[in-house]
Amino acid sequence: MSDARPELWPWLPKPLDAALAQLNSHAVLLHGPEGVGQFEFALALARAWLCEARPMGQGFAPACGRCASCHLIDAGSHPDLMVVLPEALQASLGWQSSAEEEGASDKSSSKTKKLSQEIKVDAIRSVVQFSQHTASRGRAKVVLVHPAERMNLIASNTLLKTLEEPPGQVRFVLSGAALDQLLPTVRSRCQAWRLPMPTPEVATEWLQTQLDGVSLADARVLLDAAGGQPLTARDRHQLGLDARYWPQIPKDLLNGAATALTQWPLTLVVETLQKVCHDLACVAAGASPRYFPAASLPAAPDLNLLTTWAQELRKTSRHAEHPWNQNLKVEALLVQARAVMRPRPPRGNPTA
């Protein structure tokens, strides 16, 4: 039977076994870093809760992959599973939000409108309605919301009552990376479960298998560049991040030679500059850098300058989806980076 079970990333099966043995609440708040398979883990929980291979009342185990329930989930048509995602994430995760399907016929202009990054109140109203119906297959009903922090304020408040006192056999799994962005009243109604980071060894070996022509050493560079998050490392490489070029970026920024970044998406450029700023701040504070090899970093500028730069980059990041002129915006960011990173004469020596 194990051969038919849905495959998980190699670092997820052990945490899944532990979660199924210890989670006893009707509402689970799955949290942890992005880029380690949160959605896949949350879906694996839902599969296990709905799997019909074990009699009810005998606990939970990873889904068998063979029963009718598992096949329905594979087909995206299980009547007792509702998956709620922002429109902007549905294609990348390979799953259409169940709440969106109900109103798909009314969205004839959806191809021309900008896809929403939020989970809106209409989707959560569909969740409330879904939870009030009896389970079609008699086992349970499961609602998966990912990322939970994308629920806007009205949506979060709409979910509270159902989350606290769900009717019948409804179970919730809310998955997210930013707990501080969730309402405290939502957090307090859930049993929290932290998904751990994979070990660098496991993540690096997996990453190498995903990227053609990438050596194990380059895979480790990409993994470090992504803060240890293997799915993020894979996605960034597909966007154009080259492991051989990554260590050169800080000094290229200082020398005004980071022209390769002008070919990257703006979101990746901003993220990379934030990582340079972070590692320079670590060096300035006497700590080890996280994203770049220590030898690749120039001398760190004043910590106050780095703090101001970090604030400016955060502002830019919040508006990275704005229809900027890509080339002008990236050039402005590179000029700003060089201005912050350039060496300054010691105080009291203005002619140096």
Image (cartoon, grey):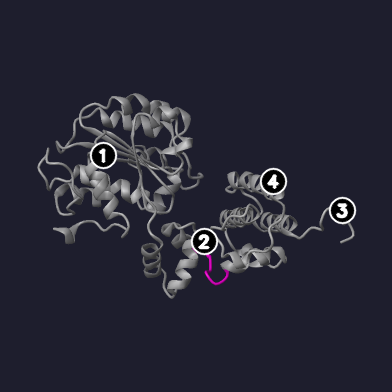
- Label number found at residue 308: 4
* Amino acid type indicated by mark 1: Leu
Q: Taking 247 as reference, is 46 left or right? A: left
Of mark 3 and mark 4, the one earlier in the sequence is 4
Q: Circle 2: is it few (<14), some (14-19), or many (20+) Cα within 10 Å?
A: many
Position of the C terminus, as image quadrant, is: bottom right
The residue under label 3 is 348
Q: Amino acid at mark 2?
A: Ala
Proximity of marks 3 and 4: CB atoms separated by less than 8 Å: no
Q: What residue did someone put label 1 on?
A: 23
Residue 136: x and y, percent?
A: 17, 36
Marks 3/1: CA–CA distance: 62 Å
The range drawn in magenta is 237-245
Find the residue positioned furthest to the left: 55
Q: Is residue 341 left or right of residue 249?
A: right
Dot 3 or dot 2: first in sequence order is 2
| Secondary structure of the residue carrying numbered label 3 | loop
Residue 225: numbered disc = 2
- Whole-angstrom CA distance, mark 4 to mark 2, is 23 Å
**Labels 4 and 1: the sequence-earlier one:** 1
In whole angstroms, how far apart are the C-alphas of marks 4 and 1?
43 Å
Q: Are marks 4 and 1 in contact (CB under 8 Å)?
A: no
Q: Nearer the viewer, residue 165 or 88?
A: 165
Amino acid type for the residue under numbered disc 3: Gly
